[in-house]
Image (cartoon, helix red, strand yellow):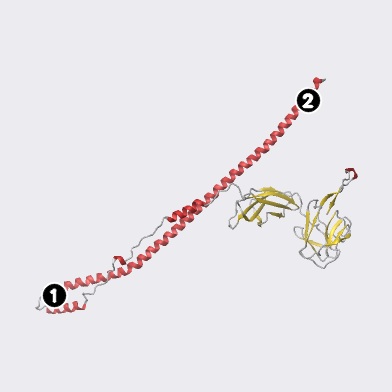
Amino acid sequence: GGDELEPELLLQEARENVEAAQSYRRELGHRLQGLREAQRQIKESASQTRDVLRQHFNDLKGTLGKLLDERLVTLLQEVDTIEQETIKPLDDCQKLIEHGVTTAEDLVREGEVAILGGLGEQNEKLWSFTKKAAHIQLDSLPEVPLLVDVPCLSAQLDDSILNIVKDHIFKHGTVASRPPVQIEELIEKPGGIIVRWCKVDDDFTAQDYRLQFRKCTSNHFEDVYVGSETEFIVLHIDPNVDYQFRVCARGDGRQEWSPWSVPQTGHSTLVPHEWTTGFEGYSLSSRRNIALRNDSESSGVLYSSAPTYFCGQTLTFRVETVGQPDRRDSIGVCAEKQNGWDSLQRDQAVCVSTNGAVFVNGKEMTNQLPAVTSGSTVTFDIEAVTLGTASANEGGNFKLRL
């Protein structure tokens, strides 16, 4: 029967080869997609950078043109002012001399007539002419300024400004091939995402970071954090919705922000913690994550609306205000909802009472915490602890420690 086996084996091998080829093709497809994204990132960021550069230099040209025009107008006005102020006294002097010339011409004409008349009956004329001539001071001449003492305008224009500006312009602007900070990881939390980022350029000293996010459906980013930390928890995240995050930095002593990091997409599958609605003794905030005890008679335990707390997480309560203390008042976590209790100081629960006493399964422990006051925070950690080397069939070989 050796003959029949071989076709079987052959078929089997062929099937395996087809499967291998399919997964190989799939893998190559993924890589092609990755390559396309990389190409798109280069091309899009390059074209965006070109636009930014063109716009900036156009603006600069416009502003520089305006500044030069303004300066020219100022200098031309200065020339006008000097010209007008210094020409006025010369004009006045000219009028004076022209008047003198006219007077002298009249006098010459009158004198010649008088002389022509001789001494006879014209005596009257000679007499009045002589009197007139004596009256006009023929020896008083107005001062005419020397050319040395009169303004001679000129413009001092120094080409060194070009060298100064040229040096500045040749150093102006730089093109960076990658932003100095990148997002390192996104960690999901109930109703939130922790964003961590790091510096990727060693020569860059960051003074502040700036984190922005947006829903993938929105087209504009908003600031959520500005400061010197390298991680931040972004809250009010809707579960199972994609969000994009990007970060940039400000260099030491600089005003302007660096380019944005490559946006990273993240989401949280963990629903935010909310209190159960419709419970008489408490009023809830709009996001149902803040509860305020009201004056209603009924008291009891207010539970979260779903068991949203899992192993490996931390759960923090913050106390905003406190009223009259009651030793049964406590904050805690429990394995399941049990109605009818007026406190979590019961079995299958761990809680801290307002005076700082710790209760486990309803028994008070010896360790005492500070009393809970306005502004206190209480954090619970839960982890799995392995117990000894009990074999699997004996049941639980680990338990939760809270």
Q: Residues within 10 Å of mark 2 (few under 14, many from 20)?
A: few
320 on left or right of 215 = right
**Residue contact between numbered discs 2 and 1, judged by CB atoms under 8 Å:** no
Of badges 2 and 1, nearer the viewer stands 2
Q: Quadrant of residue 93?
A: bottom left
Q: Quadrant of the N terminus?
A: top right
- Return the x and y of residue 117 as percentages of the image width and height: 11, 75
Q: Nearer the viewer, residue 272 or 149?
A: 149
- In this rendering, the count of numbered labels is 2
Residue type, numbered disc 2: Leu
Label 2: which residue? 9
In the structure shown, which secondary structural element does the residue marked by tag 1 occupy? helix
Disc 2 to disc 1, C-alpha distance: 154 Å
Can residue 242 be seen in the rendering of this structure?
Answer: no
Q: Quadrant of residue 360?
A: bottom right
Label 2 vs 1, first from the N-terminus: 2
The mark found on residue 220 in the picture is: none
In the structure shown, which secondary structural element does the residue marked by tag 2 occupy? helix
Residue type, numbered disc 1: Ala
Q: Quadrant of the C terminus?
A: bottom right
- Return the x and y of residue 148 as percentages of the image width and height: 30, 65
Q: Nearer the viewer, residue 89 or 160?
A: 160
Q: Residues within 10 Å of mark 1 (few under 14, many from 20)?
A: many
Q: Nearer the viewer, residue 102 or 145?
A: 145
- Return the x and y of residue 76 as percentages of the image width and height: 39, 61
Q: Residue at x 16, y 71 (%)?
A: 109
Task: Name above or below for residue 283 compared with residue 259.
Answer: below
Task: Name above or below for residue 120 compared with residue 39.
Answer: below
Can residue 331 be seen in the rendering of this structure?
Answer: yes
189 on left or right of 61 = right
Label 1: which residue? 114
- Return the x and y of residue 206 as percentages of the image width and height: 62, 55
